[in-house]
Image (tube, rainbow, N blue to C red):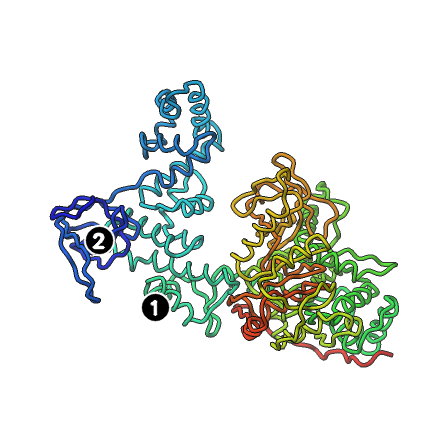
Amino acid sequence: MSVLQDQFDDTVTVLRVVSQLDRGCIFAGELSDGRPIRVKFAGKDIQPLPGDTFQVRGLVDSYRDKFGKTVVQINSKHMHRVVTEGLLLKPWLERLPNVAGTRADRLLLAFGHDLKTVLSDMSRADEVAKLIEPTKPALAAKITAQLYAAVATQSGADQIKAAELEFLIFLEELGLKESRVADQLWRFMAGFDAIDRLKRNPYVPACLMDWKPADRVGQRLLRAANEGADLQRHPARLMGALSSVWRELLSEGDTAATEESVKALLSLRGVNPQASLLLAEENGSLRRLGPLLRAPGAAWLEDQVMSAIQSIENTPLTVPIPSGQALESLVFDAEMETGLTLTDEQHTSVALLLTLPVAALQGGAGVGKTTVMKVLATAWERLGGDVVMGALAGKAALTLSKGASTSTRPRLAYTIARLIGMIERQALQAENPAFKRPASDVDFTSKTLLVVDEAGMLDTPSLHKMLSLMPEGARLLFAGDEGQLPPVGIGRVFHDVVAEGSRVARLTQVLRQAADSDIPKVAALVRQGKTPELHAWAGQAKGVFLVPIGELESVQRQLRGKGELMVIAARKDTVEAINVSESLEARSTTTPTRRLGPLATVAVGDPVAATANRYQDGLFNGLLGVVDSISGPEVAIRWDGERDPRSLPQAAEAEIELAYAITCHRAQGSGAQAVVIVVEPSRLMTREWIYTAITRSRELVILVGDSEALTKSLARRTTRTTGFSLRARITMGAAHVGRRP
């Protein structure tokens, strides 16, 4: 409509519902050309929602708002909802073989939501072919055959394809317009009964996506099932909003929050906080811990981990631990065997850790945690036990293996993903003796001491998985640094165990052997929140330096290819920009590339990172590697800490991203010869963030930014709220630990 007249008859898309009454509604909307308009409808059984499109007939009027602004208002008694066809179906069609944009448009224009019926009826194939390519009958016939095959129902896979088409049509008829949201829903609900399951659980999208699109889907489903219901106060919506709050908190790693925080987040979602929490308590889906409310699934995981730890501590020892002077002699003998000289602090820590069934070794950079683990392992083996070592990242496992081995006693360390696989296979063999395990698998026994290094980055689900598989009698040692960031995933069990304190040995002294490096000294200052005095970088190979932000690209170019380089940034858009520019710089026109999914197109030589846990494939969130080869559909990656490249499973392709630059969470557990840290304004840049980033480097750290931005970052702290509340360990008189003989 070019000019508004007295009589109005046009489509209006709802932007905001002003009021909803039994006999009418008022909403703010816009015309197809973007002009704002207000609609006042007098009639029953119409419940507009943001994003709906209505064909509106009525009289043109005007309305003056409280700010004195006049807008066009349509007073209507006749309007009906219009379903926009093709917004979801077109992207689906374009994923089919040889159906480009124009061909998809022709099919949608001709058939709309009847497309599924048409493509299920072979008698209409000629009609479809003429639409696809009117002037090329041979090509049209070939493409049509492929199109019908894609939605045919002869096989299970093809039935799923047909079900996806039906699901998308259903979403379009509800009024959903975002293809990305529809794809997310299908990936989660995929199946022949996806529509029925979504109808039964209209707010399941709240667990998957941001609240606004989830609420749009939920309200549309509720409206379709019960026209006239109070959508805003519907119990399903109240519970959906709470699910959305938990999703937001869990995405930040929190497993609990204060009631005030939860209520504030519920208010932002437009629901009554008190009503939502009351309903959750009535149906038993709300967990409390003192002043905290706990996310239900996360609470179960945390409680399972606490029970597993208590079970380990309550299980009788299978490896007898001496006390008094005998314990002192054991530690001294292990020290002599390894050829190491421990400090008094380290010596005391080894003796204490031997007496604790579950323990944490806490220490900052350069304090000798690996040395303590080496002597501890030797002492445990002298008592007749066996030691298994692991770390979440492959490179951390490799470093631990080198540091904990001696010339006469090599000790391999494995990634947590590999250890979990080993324990699972051991359990399978116990059930079925005919099952064969790889010869490289280690055995877990009642005498096993499992040592987990870089334990601060082990999230609660991974720890639960590991503990649920450990044999009765086995014991556990966490080693890490509470000054670093908590895990990528939910929880912070290591940090919580250290904070509780009754199972902890602490190392605080930075050792002399680290004195030739500035990194531990600078890291210690950062850990205290003090801004270190840093010099400009002039090409030095070792030390910690500061350069202006404008020199980032120059620094990367100078360091790339001269050794291991890790670039760390806080903001995802910064990471993405660096990845794009560096990947283009590194590739030539002949470099083999492959599109893996929405996150990355990779080439041979590209650094990459896994973004999800796949224990069955030996992958975890944050694992770093380098693309070794691309051959047709196969991409081989050499992961950190592994000797040989491995083919990337097809199911994991969408969970790989470029890693020329990475976030600090991705960097945890790994390290490099040189680390470049982008210091930029971001709430994510905290004292713990800077400390973690600096301690990723073995030789050279270059902070790119200015001293003022660094000081502001060090003033911020990383916080995480959990419901993990481990009781203090009750000791029956700890063994006396004195000085070495």
Q: Is residue 140 above or below residue 361?
A: above
Identify which residue, 23 or 93, lies in the foreground.
Answer: 93
Quadrant occupied by the C terminus: bottom right
Q: Position of residue 661 (x, y in %)?
A: 60, 55
The residue identified by callout 1 is 274
Q: Position of residue 40 (x, y in %)?
A: 17, 54
Q: Is residue 470 above or below residue 433?
A: below
Q: Is residue 717 above or below residue 554?
A: below
- Circle 1 sits in a helix, a strand or a loop, which is it? helix
Q: Position of residue 100 (x, y in %)?
A: 43, 32
Label located before the other in sequence (1 or 2): 2
The residue identified by callout 2 is 37
- The residue located at (46%, 35%) in the rendering is 95
- Please state if 346 lies on the left or on the right of 314 as rendered: right
- Please state if 720 lies on the left or on the right of 640 as rendered: left
Q: What's the mark number on residue 176? A: none
Looking at the picture, which amino acid does disc 2 mark?
A: Ile
Quadrant occupied by the N terminus: top left
Within 10 Å of disc 2 (Cα), the crowding (few <14, some 14-19, many 20+) is: many
Looking at the picture, which amino acid does disc 1 mark?
A: Gln
Tell me if residue 475 can be seen: no
Q: Is residue 445 above or below residue 11?
A: below
